[in-house]
Amino acid sequence: MVATAKNADGTLTWLRGRNRQRVVEILRTQGQVSQADIARATGLSRTTVSTLVMELKDAGFVVDTEPRSSRRRGGRPAVQLSLRDPGHVVAGIDFGHSHVGVAVADLGHKVLAERRQELDVNRQAAQALDAAARMFAEVLETAGVDRKKVVGAGIGIPGPVDRARGTAGSATILPGWVGLRIAKEMEARLGVPVEIENDANLGAAAELTWGAGRDCSNFAYIKAATGIGAGIVIDGHLLRGATGTAGEIGHTTLDERGLLCYCGNRGCLETVASGPAIVRLVGPVDGTLLSLDQIVERAAAGDVRCRRAIADAGREIGVAVAGLCNLINPNRVIVGGLLSRAGDVLLRAMRESIRRHAVQAAAECVDVRAAVFVERAELLGAVALPLLSVSASQNLR
């Protein structure tokens, strides 16, 4: 009888500790939340959450903070909670095709400093890594943070990632990075744990942490720009797959007899709806090929030719997204990347295709909307990686 009581007591202690950890993780991943938000996210009762929060406050881990702009239409905003800032920070590094960006943020999700440098990243791998290391030191100095306080860093590259090896997963996208163990190279330069991801997953992480996915635990983020990719969030976690290539919808085959794609297959989505495909479709204007930026700007200003090209691309993307909706049944599809600047020209066409090609139940429940972030999506996503990672919490001292 006594043994049973001891076992029960041990079970209750374990459960209480587990629930406390769940509350801390919600605060860590969402930055600022109310007790009601924590209760909804964890499924714990408000009484239990209130008790755990009080314990965490008494221990000095949690504090009341200045509320963000309230979503309520009226009345007093809910009291916001956050982890007490122990001075620890996280860093993010974004390797674009032609730039390197670095940022540092505190555990309350506030970006403290950031830098950007134009560079031919595709072919100058060593220079890009060295530039990132130098900029990392600069942002820490600007933020007034000691390197020992960096919990971890996230790195993003514009293409598939082999997470097991920490390398680029495509020699055709980043020719100068073939065989390079990017994560290890950066860890050696920075002296902190590093996690690597592709750009679409970074966009999803940014939207999950700060943007249009903050209140949604199941969504697909579509990056539509020079290339097309998806970042998939299931139950609040990034879906990466066995080798890290989950979400490569740009290489969904739409036409087996179509144009040859750089991946080696024919008729991939990217051959008809990516930036280069749209530029090709619009063709020369007054003897000059427009850039994708110019096409998007003209479409937003009402240019019929450019609007039609983007709408056509949206319909093709919608076909691939419809398949995604059938497979994972997301609540939301968040569209980012340069093409998202075209707004409803792109989104309306995507919605039409999803309604036509997805099963009715999946099509009716999905909300297709533009992302909050475009230019800074990958950099903010790189910052979000260590914030969302359990391993980051294990490095706190």
Image: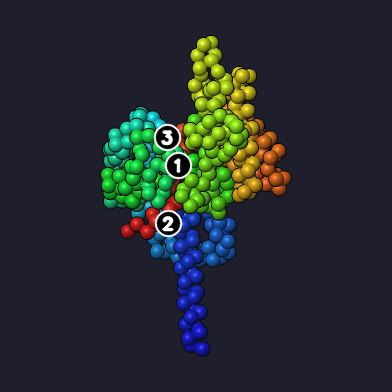
Check residue 172 in the rendering and tell me which mark sits there, or answer none: 3
> Would you say the residues marked 3 and 1 are in contact, meaning their CB atoms lie under 8 Å apart?
no
Identify which residue is drawn at 53% across, 44% down.
247
Element on which disc 2 rests: helix
Whether residue 200 sits left or right of residue 113 in the image: it is right
> Would you say the residues marked 1 and 2 are in contact, meaning their CB atoms lie under 8 Å apart?
no
Picture layout, residue 60 above or below residue 240: below
Which residue matches tag 2?
A: 390
Which residue matches tag 1?
A: 160
Check residue 27 in the rendering and tell me which mark sits there, or answer none: none
Residue 122 visible (yes or no): yes
Q: Earlier in the sequence, mark 1 or mark 2?
A: 1
Amino acid carrying mark 1 in the image: Pro
Picture layout, residue 338 above or below residue 247: above
Q: CA distance from mark 3 to mark 1?
A: 11 Å
Identify which residue is drawn at 58% across, 61% down.
43
- Pick the quarter of the image with the C terminus: bottom left
Q: Earlier in the sequence, mark 3 or mark 1?
A: 1
Identify which residue is drawn at 71% across, 38% down.
356
Packing grade of label 1 (10 A; few <14, some 14-19, many >=20) is many
